[in-house]
Amino acid sequence: MAVPVLTGLALGFGLASCGGAPPAPREYPRLEDESVEPAPETIAREPLRDAPLVVAQPSSDPVVTFRVAFEAGSASDPAGYEGVTRLAAELMAGGGAGALSYAELSRALYPMAGRISAHVERDMTVFVGQVHRDHADAFYALFRDVLLQPRMSEEDFGRVRDQQRDALVVSLRSADDEELGKQALQTLMYEGHPYAHPALGTEAALARVRVDDVRAQRARVFCAGRSIVGIAGDYPAPLAERLRSDISQLTSAQCVGRRVLPAPPDVERRRVLIVRKPEAQSVAVSMGFPIDVQRDDPDYPALVLVAAWLGQHRQFIGRLMQQIRGERGLNYGDYAYAEHFTQEGWSTFPLPNVARRQQHFSIWLRPLRPETAHFAIRLAIRELTQLVEGGMDQEALDRVRAFADRYYALFLQTSSRRLGFAMDDAYYGVDAAYLERLRESWRALTPETLNATMRRHLTPDRLQIACVASDAEQLAEALATDAESPITYRSEVSAAVLAEDRDIVAYPLQIPRDRIRIQPVDTLF
Amino acid sequence: MASAQTVFPDAPREDRLPNGMRVISLRTDSPGIVAYYTLVGVGARDEVEPGHSGYAHLFEHMMFRGTERHPQADYEAAIQGFGADNNAYTTQDFTLYTVTAPSSVLAQVVELEADRFQNLSYTEEAYRTETGAVRGEYDTSAARPSTRMWETLSEIAFSRHTYGHTTLGYLRDIDRMPEEVAYSRRFFQRFYTPDNTTLIVAGDVDHDQLLALAREHYGRWRGRRARSRIQAEPEPTEGVRRHIDWPAPASPRMYAAWRTPAFVSGRTDAARAAALRDTAALRVVHGLLFSESAPLYQRLVVEDRSVIELGSWAGDHSIDPHLFVATAVLAEGAEFDATLGALQGAIDALAEGEVDAERVEAVKSHVRYALLTDMQTPSDVADMAARYIAVGGSLDALDGYLAALAAVTPADVSRVAGELLTESRRFVVTLARGSAE
């Protein structure tokens, strides 16, 4: 049951812009003031859980893994404080704790090669600790302090904030067009919604936030009643219970339940956001739309197969990869996803513990030469449309099912990943393990049931398209007028490809100019 | 003391086929999964002809183009049917093909992989199309300041040796690739030979079964690796510094690099042991100066916050003399000279004998435990083995390296800092937002 919480002090906003004087900076109430909630509207909240959910997976693995996930992420950032949840997590994982300064903590972890990291997504934050079993107890004492007694000092805060600002303002905007395109798609799909801003926050909020706000945010959201804790490997048996009872202590009057999420914007037709970045040498493209399917939904396994057929991440089985890279050599890779996806490090597998309450289907085209971008966007949308309209036949279903049935087992190779997936199962409240659930559903699928499921959820007419491009006006104009996008190759391609191209170059996307927005990169986030 | 026996769960097994190909198995407790890694001793280092950088990496792509027996579509369909994770990567020294698959399909994987390494066949059209994907990969990374910085650092640090270009190659050479199909075929014949190939299989594998399969499917493979006439790089006599004006917003950043010896070199056992000891001592310097726990790191990043990120490349060993690289992202307003001075000052202090013996032991412990915790999957184990075989010649190189590491003394640290990490051997690239490109 949702518990509405009335909040006050929405006063004073907007008054400053009256008259001729330059507007004064907005004065936001401080987060640490318990009587204050900065969001102006009434906020409905979910109840807190009575105790942490616990997943223990003892094994002979000499690497011991602790995962402590909180049902809190950037969607928990109060308005005006975008990025504060990630600041809190990074300040905990990268600052002093208990009796130790950050320098002392680093020195204590170093000889055991112990690692403590935090990852913040829209709806979830996970702290991961890993160490060899030789040091499990000594490491746990440090990990525990990071979670229960972080110092969150002013000095550490200044550094962590500088790093986060650099990651947002410099690295994301300037040095990683692929990630920028993905974040722009989130902003477009979730306009006006708590998922709209990146976990890194916004430039304005990072400039405003103070260490007390970050401490207050930790107290509000990193609570036992929002936690799922896990331990795996060859750990001393009492550690599982210690972890549970320690995390259970994370309760206070400041803890609040999760904010009830509004529905994503109900957009019926295609829209485009072009991020204008003058120095971009290629065009990054992400597209997608919200779907009402979570891991616990009976339709989820079918959509996983559909996405795998269309574009399993970094695998050649995907139709988009075959058509755009394999047949035409237009870019490095082209993929599709049935839920939010973050790649784990250099592996090709998804990061666990990035669960969300609302999901989206998406397609990612890696950077394209500007002269081929329009063509590739057409090709991808045409492929998706043909798939939805034409459906998959028995042969295609059998092939992708055989692939996925084995390939998805590789997601679970380490005890840390097995633990993470099991915690996600606990989060979604499902009673069978991820892979078993998928396999069982896949076995029962027929082309008819698969295609019916696909058509219920995948609607190419609703595609929201985000691009990062230098000549944004030219791309917008080409898209808006459905101008032909002729393509030339430096090599001979097959007659079949050329025949298909004749259709693709004029494939109508039907996106009038008033549904195409151009935004300069430095005003995004 | 650490040894390969404590790093690998089981003792490795190794055989050599009559044609020179090595077959190594590393059993791990990973029921039902094998990592089937094919190491080819060719990297950007072997790209000696002017105008032809990037070909080792191009083959990482071309190898997925199929054979007459198993055209690309068949190969991919088969690999997909196995549910395998199939990829590859290229470094300056080697190319590694990485298949991770259910152990139940090992025999089929051997057959497919043996076929493509012996019988790769591609049309000119397929070749040209794949060069487009390579260009796309270049575009993918071109927006990153680190790409340009690494290209520049390689150029100023190596005037003769092929380490002067990156594995992706010069853009001008990538753009010429489509016209070079004949050259590409010669490149393949020169380096894709059994004596230049090592099969490394980790996980749920039976060595005798693997060996029998390898004999059957790779046994008829013939060929000798061509020698690469790589020019030796003269020892540096004075440092070089280069600045890049970056046309987009970027925090000021710096690569500071010092010329270091090869991972292992020398003809006699004693010379090789001495070289490994230098390599191990340099690894300790990385930990002493650039880990989060290091006083230098704490001073620059935590206390005066002139540096946002500080790191170094610690694990990258190489066949020929290469670089010890420190990387720094500076806070706005911080000066390159001050940061560089702080790095060199900390190194010089080590050279002068200011080495904390307790911290040396902490670094040794860290390296050992990091190795152990990094090897969690069959792929991790195969990858680790491949890297040491590629640059050290055999799995013994890992043993030797760990033994050398255990023996490093504070005096070794002072010696390598004083002899190798000096200003006259230093190459620096800085980058900041500027007007001109």
Image (cartoon, rainbow, N blue to C red):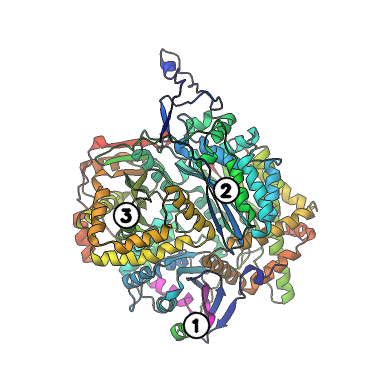
* Residue linked to disc 2: A117
Q: Position of residue B266 (x, y in %)?
A: 69, 73
Give the number of the mark in front: 2 or 3: 3
Is B292 in the magenta?
no
Position above or below: A171 against A307: above
* Residue linked to disc 3: A303
Q: Are marks 2 and 1 on the same chain?
A: no
Q: Position of residue B369 (x, y in %)?
A: 66, 60
Chain letter for mark 3: A
* Residue linked to disc 1: B209
* Mark 3 vs mark 1, CA separation in Å: 39 Å
Q: Position of residue A133 (x, y in %)?
A: 65, 59
**Closer to the camera, B49 or A369?**
A369
Identity of the residue drawn at 47% across and 20% down: A9
User: Is there CB contact under 8 Å for labels 2 and 3?
Assistant: no
Q: Are marks 3 and 1 on the same chain?
A: no
Judge left or right: residue B5 versus residue B37.
right
Give the magenta part as a residue range. B182-211
Q: Residues within 10 Å of mark 3 (few under 14, many from 20)?
A: many
Q: Position of residue A493 (x, y in %)?
A: 26, 64
Name which residue type carries label 3. Answer: Leu
User: Is there CB contact under 8 Å for labels 2 and 1?
Assistant: no
